[in-house]
Image (cartoon, helix red, strand yellow):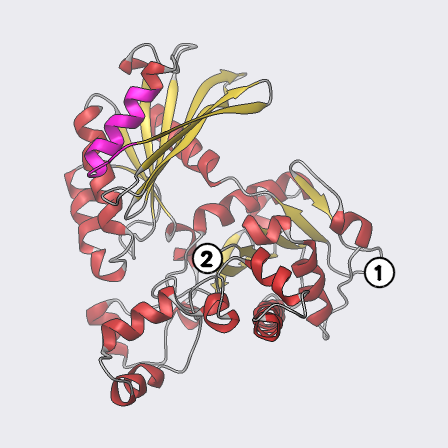
Amino acid sequence: MTNQDKILIINAGSSSIKFQLFHFTTINQVPVFTILSKGLVERIAIKNSNFIIEIAKDHDFIKHEKSSDIANHNLGAQIIIDALVKYQLINDFNEIKGIGHRLVHGAQKFKTSTIIDQNVIAGIEACIPLAPLHNPPALKAITAFQKLMAHVKHVGVFDTSFHTSIPETNFLYAVPYRWYQDYQVRRYGFHGISYRYILTKLANILTKPVGQINAIVCHLGNGASICAIKNGASYNTSMGLTPLDGLMMGTRSGVIDPSIHGYMCDVAKNTNITTVTNDLNKAAGLLGISQHSSDLRDIISASNDPNHPHHQQSQLAIKMFIQRIANYIIQYANDLANQIDALVFTAGIGENSALIRQLVIAEIKVLTVTLNDQQNNAKYEDYLEISSKASTIPIYKIKTNEEIMICQDTYDLLVNH
């Protein structure tokens, strides 16, 4: 390894490719990662495609943006690589030692991150019925970057891997057991890469071994979930077979009566199981209840404006959102026998919305959890304890970093294989 060694991180969606480029070196045999750039190819195969690259400079980023038609993931991958060369982030393709790919669903096949070969690709393809929106674009990105960068190792890092420790009593649904045996119907959980990062961070904050940590982590963004971590491993989580289960989210309903699917197919015109599922994924949640936005910032603004046409609906959406978060926290406190080292808020909403943190904590009546209002509202770089002295459970806001976890896993597999 030389001082020019770099790792590229790829997070592909159906019409986008997010990326980050890291330089790595070792100090006392410990890897140190430095971000060089980040960016996004968006609206792939859609009119007005766009490419954004941000280049790190003096603790900030310089942004460059260009609009052009981007027909497919192959072209998107080429644009990313060309930009890394253009802006002299790499001088030689050989500087990139590995590419780490975020993969949403590995089912029960992938319990750890792994170097991608044809068997792994076949395994990811086999999981497509469980993640039809996520795994196909990830496979497209893997194929595209393998063609461009055939000389490097490609690593798959799975969101579901962290949750493979969940016990049967928590991952099984009360459905015919053969559904699990024959069709893999079970709770898988997601946001696992983020939870791993938070767990590692907590070990440093609490100066406690990972294997001894009990925590409840609220990953609250447009997609949202909660995880109960027991003895350093996932013990329960709110998302299920798919990311549709659990909390109310930006556009996802979260947990509902499963009979709603059949009922809507019976009573609504031009409706079938596909359209109902699509609505529950893309037209429900905060958007469905507020009737005007999936962005919590818009909803909070409308809730504070009595003249907004969706004022009351926005207030209702917020109340429903926080109530469901609080209920999961209470359930998971019971799962952990109230032996909790930390309650953590992370991801876009969890990290940035002091109001939502305040409302959630106020909604919890059966635990002694209280906030320090000044700390809750304070700016912070990495993490901050926001609980008051009266709180029996320490409460933190922590900025997650999924990309650095993918980078770490990619590095580890490069070194050890």
Q: Is residue 70 magenta?
A: yes
Q: Which residues fall within the magenta stretch?
A: 68-83
Along the polypeptide, which appears first: circle 1 or circle 2? Answer: 2
Give the class, few, some or many, for how many residues have Cα within 10 Å of label 1's Cα (few <14, many ≥20).
few
Image depth: mark 1 or mark 2 in front: 2
**Circles 1 and 2: CB atoms closer than 8 Å:** no
Q: Is residue 195 visible?
A: yes
Residue 312 image offset from top left, x and y in percent = 61, 75
Quadrant position of the C terminus in the picture = top left
Left or right: 128 with respect to 225?
left
Q: Quadrant of residue 406?
A: top left
Q: Quadrant of residue 280?
A: bottom left
Question: Which label number is shown at residue 50?
Answer: none
Left or right: 145 with respect to 207?
left
Q: Quadrant of residue 149?
A: top left
Quadrant position of the N terminus in the picture = top left
Mark 2: amino acid:
Gly
Mark 2 lies on residue: 223
Residue 401 versus residue 88: which sits nearer the camera? 88
Residue 51 versus residue 232: which sits nearer the camera? 51
Residue 261 image offset from top left, x and y in percent = 31, 81
Mark 1 lies on residue: 390
Above or below 159: residue 242: below
Outermost residue, right side: 389
Residue 263 image offset from top left, x and y in percent = 31, 88
Mark 1: amino acid:
Ala
- Say which element carries label 2: loop
Left or right: 129 with respect to 67?
left
Q: Is residue 345 magenta?
A: no
Numbered label tally: 2
